[in-house]
Amino acid sequence: MAISKRDLSARSFRAFLALFQVIGYASLLSCQGIEMEMLSSSGAMSLERHSEDYCAMYDICGERSDGKVLNCPYGSSSVKPDELFSAKIQSLCPTISGNVCCTETQFETLRAQVQQAIPFLVGCPACLRNFLNLFCELSCSPNQSLFINVTSVTEIDGNMAVDAIDFFVTDTFGEMLYDSCKEVKFGTMNTRAIDFIGAGAKSYREWFSFIGQKADLGFPGSPYSISFKSNVPESSGMELMNVSSYSCGDTSLGCSCGDCPASPFCSDAEPPSPHKRDSCSISIGSLEVACLELSLGILYIVFISAFFGWSSCYGRRENRRPAPIRKPLLDPINDGESSSVLQKDKERPVKMEEMASAESNMVQFSSVQGYISSFYRSYGLWIARNATLVLCSSLAIVLLLCLGLLRFEVETRPEKLWVGPGSKAAEEKQFFDSHLAPFYRIEQLILATVPDVEGGRQPSIVTDRNIRLLFDLQQKVDGIRVNISGKMVSLADICLKPLGNDCATQSILQYYKMDPDSYNMYGGVTHAEYCFQHYTSADTCMSAFEAPLDPSTALGGFSGNNYSEASAFVVTYPVNNAMDDATDENRMALAWEKAFIQLAKEELLPSAESNNLTLSFSSESSIEEELKRESTADVLTIVVSYLVMFAYISFTLGDPLSSSTFYISSKVLLGLAGVLIVMLSVLGSVGFFSAIGIKSTLIIMEVIPFLVLAVGVDNMCILVHAVKRQPSDMSLEERISSALVEVGPSITLASLSEVLAFAVGAFIPMPACRVFSMFAALAILLDFLLQVTAFVALIVFDFTRAENNRVDCLPCIKINSPGVSDEVSHQRNPGLLVRYMKDVHARILGHWAVKIFVVAAFVAFSLASIALCTRIEAGLEQQIVLPQDSYLQGYFNNVSEYLRVGPPLYFVVKDYNYSAESSHTNKLCSISHCDANSLLNEISRASLTPESSYIAKPAASWLDDFLVWLSPEAFGCCRKFINGTYCPPDDQPPCCTPDEGPCGIGGVCEDCTTCFLQSDLKKGRPSTGQFREKLPWFLKALPSADCAKGGHGAYTSSVNLNGYESGVIHASEFRTYHTPLNKQGDYVNSMRAAREFSSRVSSSLKMDIFPYSVFYIFFEQYLDIWRVALMNIAIALGAIFVVFLVVTSSLWSSIIMLVVLAMIVVDLMGVMALLNIQLNAVSVVNLVMSIGIAVEFCVHIMQAFLVSVPWQSKPKNARGSHYHGCFCLQRYYPDKAMRSTCTFLRQIRNLCGLLLPNVPGIGYYWLFAWACPSTCIAEFVWSTSKIYGCRETTA
């Protein structure tokens, strides 16, 4: 993105430089016969030579070998012109009246040469007037001898000619001239006019020094030396030239605010102050602390103090209470007895009905959980009896979904992956491409030196050897040929050509016209270093496509303007682009780009490395091609991961290793089936969305298999171990049913929460992340359904196999060894991890001090993470989404390190009404008579604060240049033949044919006149008809020495002429540049600044204006990524909270779940800040994913806690009233009214438990000890059949 095609001016920019010859020609006379008696001796020095009405130089006495003529050093009295000649002089030099020191032919020569400078300066009348006055006084002033002194002469063809003069000028005039011109813009090149006519002078003395330099043969400039002085020698009779000068803020000759920011007219429009984030901080001594961090610190101190106080009080109360008794999950109870049948009496048989009865009496289920448990109890029995039917039907459905894989496609186009269809940036790009022109394709090479081993400093790359190497590389690039439908395509066939037949390649080789033969002829490296400073003024530095080449676009790794210290060559090949990829133009470009990358890898890179240089490269299609390559690069990783997970599942699902029973108790086949189920769920999800036309992405192919595998393995282990935990004397059907009752609700709740958490990602606007979330949600849903259907059926088959002593993996083989089944059954003891969690981890965590420490530590981590979150930057480094071995990794690093020019920035104006009745023209332009707050003036003002506006330069304005081109003062620009057709400048065909020799006045264009007189325009503005007629002329006009404002090349695509005849231009653009953008944050902030600027200007001008740059479409998401992230996290947390509350009917537990999940997300964001992980759509999806993964663990723990018996610290009757009231009711009176009553009472209990903390003597324990009578009354009202049994449990 080093250049913009609208930067490339016309071929005749070379002729711009000829305007400096104004200095040499200004005081010359035409070659006429000179009467020698009028001339005094060359050595005669009398007082009359420095007096009023006397000329210091007159006539022409010679000509240099390069054709530049020299004045005669002989003075003469001034001459009175005739009336017509005097009127001509007055039209150009109004300060000169009466006698003059020039002839009519000399004046016409002066006028012809001055016209080259007028297009640069006419936008600021004060500057133009001061500039013309300087040369008018030098050429034609009747008092010329008072301030000009000939100091040196030379002999040419026997005649003496001027070789050097002193020009005495007051400092006041010099300062006024420079101040009025120093800010005048030359829009075509996005730079100042003084860079062209003053070599970028920083003061009037530097400008005068540049003007006065004697030009070498063949170079533009003065043919003799001019020494500007501000002190007159004593007794010389001379005076300082002090003709009238004008300030750029002069009301009669006022300039625009863009050309004259110091104008009083612009005093109210100060440059915008740099935008600073509102940051609050407090100083504590020498320490400065952010307000947020201090607030969080205070909050933590308050929380810890309150928590410690409450914990101490609670601990002392607990110490005075009897030791509690913990009741295990599913502990059978008969009439409230606290005996553990499963743990203390393993020999006692427990029937299915007794377990159900005990569960109903002990486990505190909500109505929803009750329904789920009832469903799983019946479902478990049914699936155990119909395992084959369930397995076949579930697999058939998933395989049917997999048929959609026939339409499987992978989306690799970056704009389709990262930009949503409703994106504002996408709409603006579509408008720009369709109404103006698509941004060209970029092919780029970056050749850089290697840092020194000792100092680490990179040496300069501007050496003879490196430039010759660059010529060799360029020759290989030019030699690329690709066959497209029988046509051999080269770079010359597809490259951008603004005017002629030469590509607009941005390379240092342009200083040698891209010709290696010119390298030695121009002086080698010395010529390049000369062009670094004179690229706008030296004809020999013009590029092959005949436009100035800014060295900052072809060099990298330098500071300031020290181009000779550059450590990198940056070669950019702009290639024509089209909106439709299927066009022949784009197909040729794509084929050439593939050949270019292949050449760079196989030949260019080795050549660079052999010369101890580094080479990075890229093409327009590189990112898409690398993404395609990545789609197949990780297949091996996925396969290996699944094999490892298969081995892990097989090991964990089986019983402890035993040489005698391993082949029976192992679960290898079951583990393999579980992994296949996970794969089928992923394939089913991809197949479903492929069938409905949604393309897959690389993130889906690489992440979802691992994600679903992780979630699926967890549920598989839970199901298998739940079956193993069931009493061995129960039938397999009863064990399956009981296991599903035990873990089914928690698995269902966890899976539903995960599906909702991932589905929330569908709200993310980025297509890649939105599609990923949809695929993941469906994959997890399918995985859950397959687990509770196909996998449970497989568990039935596997346990049946084990009970029948059949070998794992070879179920056809049966071991008829007695005692094997008994040995397998006796191996169902708790494993090492279970024993650790029960006997070590839970005991340590249950200690009072450990609880306090854990809560305090994690609250501190969460609060610290909140403070760290403010440091997370928005963005997504390109390197992250590309393969680690991609050649683009080094390219993007070098782009950030070396490039010193920012991306082009366009301000696009919709529906510009150019009619005379409209004020739109003055609201946009920046020349004289334009509004102070016009768009272009505001852009110019914003460029004064690039650190906040990210605008590097004033904008190139087709409108300004068009209005100047129309102006009668720019008499060499807008011209017409007698028949009214367009007449080009005198130095262009048909007025001048280069083959016929030097151009002169006369010929076919001698009757051409300016398009308008000053009286034809109203305040310098054309009428609607004039505007409509002349705009196409301007856009087709070639710039040249006689008129540098031609619009062809520079503005060809800047204006959409479709339908402009109605008086409205539907689309036009004004181009500038962003500052160099090296970080992701710079891209985001520059886009935000441009949009804020555009919004403010649009509102002020009441016009539709928007900014556009080629990277906006990819970075728009980051403008509100924080809002998107917080919204998606909030929705995910809210959905889980609602689901958990509905299923468990426990408000307090739901709040705990919500707080824990929120802390997990906040902690993750804190880690992101520590690891410098940026916030983008990918990380937002990962944060939502973390909620989905974390909720599974939290749900299982919370569900186990809710269905277990709490600590027993109340009398027996109180315990009975609390736990048996409603559940006794539901067990014996399951009618709808009774269940509704119990549900209502539980909701009251939850509310009271939330309002009254659950501490001894307070809260719902105490409240519901007295609520039992209400329950019993309800029982009596609805039925009396078994009320005695209920009262026994509540007694």
Image: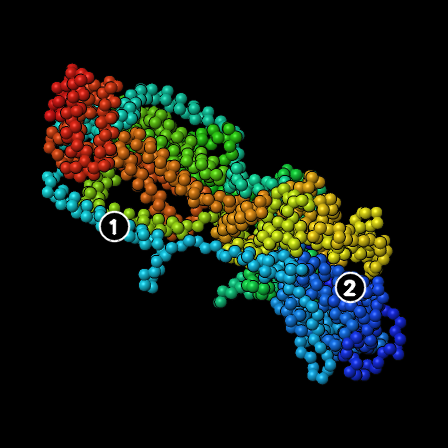
Q: Secondary structure at mark 2?
A: helix
In the foreground, 216 or 258: 258
In the foreground, 362 or 953: 953
Does residue 145 sit above or below 398 in this rendering? Answer: below
Earlier-in-chain disc, 2 versus 1: 2
**Tag 2 and tag 1, C-beta contact below 8 Å:** no
Q: Is residue 391 left or right of residue 371?
A: right
Which picture quadrant has residue 679? top left
Residue sitting at x 64%, y 47%: 919
Residue 156 placement (x, y as % from top left):
83, 75
Q: Is residue 740 left or right of residue 401?
A: left
Neighbor class of circle 2 (other Cα within 10 Å; few <14, some 14-19, many 20+) is few
Q: How is the image coloured?
A: rainbow
Q: How many marks?
A: 2
Does residue 628 sit above or below 192 in this rendering? Answer: above
Which picture quadrant has residue 827? top left
Residue 1209 placement (x, y as % from top left):
13, 36
Residue sitting at x 82%, y 77%: 74
The residue tagged 2 is 90
Labelled disc at residue 302: 1
In the foreground, 437 or 297: 297
Does residue 923 sit above or below 823 in this rendering? Answer: below
Residue 1067 placement (x, y as % from top left):
64, 43
Amino acid type for the residue under numbered disc 2: Gln
Say which of marks 2 and 1 sits in front.
2
Q: Is residue 629 left or right of residue 931?
A: left
Amino acid type for the residue under numbered disc 1: Val
Residue 1004 placement (x, y as % from top left):
85, 53
